[in-house]
Amino acid sequence: MAKVKVDLKERGYDILIGSDNLAELGKLVHDQKWGREIFIITDPLVNDLYGDQVRRGFKEQVRTIELQRGERYKNLGEAGKIYDQLVKMKAHRDALIIALGGGVIGDIAGYIAATYMRGINYLQVPTTLLAQVDAAIGGKTGVNHPRGKNLIGCFYQPRGVYIDVATLATLPARELRTGLAEVVKYGVIEDADFFKFLEANAHQLNTRTFESDETKQAAFKLWQTIVLEAAKIKAKIVEKDEKEKGLRMVLNYGHTVGHALESLTRYRTYNHGEAVAVGMVAAALIASKMRMLDGEGVARLVSLLEKLELPTRIEGLPVAKLVNYLGLDKKVKAGRVNFVLPEKLGRVVIRNDVPAAVIRQVLTELGAA
Ligand SMILES: NC(=O)c1ccc[n+]([C@@H]2O[C@H](COP(=O)([O-])OP(=O)(O)OC[C@H]3O[C@@H](n4cnc5c(N)ncnc54)[C@H](O)[C@@H]3O)[C@@H](O)[C@H]2O)c1
């Protein structure tokens, strides 16, 4: 299993990455003495697919709490029901929560671990690509409020992140692509070689129909490589800026326009990664208009996203409304919109001086009306 350290001193932990390794988690938890009672928080589908594999590895009693699938269940009301179950089952301070699922499960289970009895141990066991490369790493936990996404939450680091890339084999294609958008983001913000690697492997990354066991194992190996590289980049950024005071903002590359798109279309047209993909193109075009990124950089980004079947254009949405939503973006500081802009593939800067006319021009070029 590959290992990436997240060095946060006493809050530090390892990200372990392997394939078909869920059954070995129990032994690790036991050896590390992470908890005397185990509570898995998961959703019904992930529980059906992978719950038994995880439970099988434990000698301790394991209890499982299910949350319905979907972003709309990531709220305080549902969290309340989970606290009720923990209380009813008499979960103590030395209990361990295992978050088994996508980012929704990871965020709410992490928040519950942070707050139940003022904080108990938890592990992230992410089963979507987005959660494996992003959500599960860095200790951002929380739930949504009716007035906005992720408005309630805190930073609370897990004891570890335990990844089995074989779980990606059952992930719907669209969910896989949403994770790939975040993977591309890491290439642009931090690592030009990684970007090149993604260009060379784009087709295989987006394939999940396996002709033989051999092709399946080859795919797992490739996923392991990209999850490892992405985890290294995210870990490095989190180490430098645990609580998102500055540098960690670079992770918002593509998210400024992305969030505006998600909000304007009420989270129905674009999923997160798709919105980020368009947002990354928008930011790259802005950068090129501001004479930072060259045309080749923009073209390579668009071409990679297209190969991954991610959207790169905004069709038919009104520019004026998008600009309006940009003003409400939570990455706004002192009345100015922050943009993470690439200077070249592998390096970005944060700028809050993008002229409104440039934003409008880029949105129009991308197909907004
Ligand atoms: N904490 C952070 O730093 C951070 C970062 C990015 C995103 N997030 C959060 O993550 C959430 C999105 O996460 P997501 O994209 O993983 O979506 P998700 O958690 O909703 O999972 C998507 C769907 O995939 C299913 N699923 C999960 N694993 C599967 C598997 N292996 N096979 C088949 N189906 C599977 C789930 O049942 C779910 O319906 C959002 O709430 C977002 O706010 C958090």
Image (tube, rainbow, N blue to C red):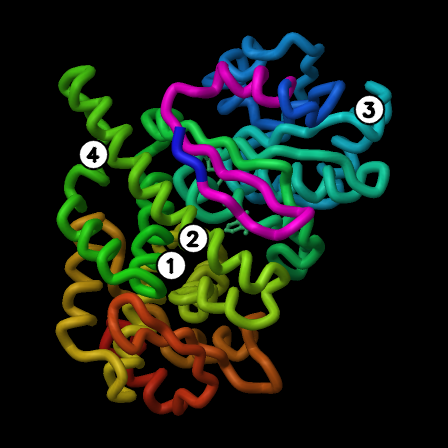
- The residue to which callout 3 is attached is 91
Furthest toward the front, the residue is: 9
- The residue to which callout 1 is attached is 275
Is-magenta flag for residue 192? no
Q: Amino acid at mark 1?
A: Ala
- Residue 3 in the figure: left or right of residue 242: left
* Dot in front, 4 or 2: 4
Q: Is residue 351 above or below residue 138?
A: below
| Residue 311: x %, y % from top left | 26, 57
Residue 165 appearing in the image: yes
Q: Are marks 2 and 1 in contact (CB under 8 Å)?
A: yes
* Dot in front, 4 or 3: 3
Q: Residue 68: name its quadrant.
A: top right
Mark 3 C-beta to ligand 1 under 8 Å: no
- Label 4 to label 3: alpha-carbon separation: 42 Å
Tell me which numbered mark, 1 or 4, is placed earlier along the sequence: 4
Q: Disc number at residue 272?
A: 2
- Label 1 to label 4: alpha-carbon separation: 21 Å
- The residue to which callout 4 is attached is 207
| Residue 101: x %, y % from top left | 52, 31
Mark 2 C-beta to ligand 1 under 8 Å: yes
Q: Secondary structure at mark 4?
A: loop
Is-magenta flag for residue 8? yes
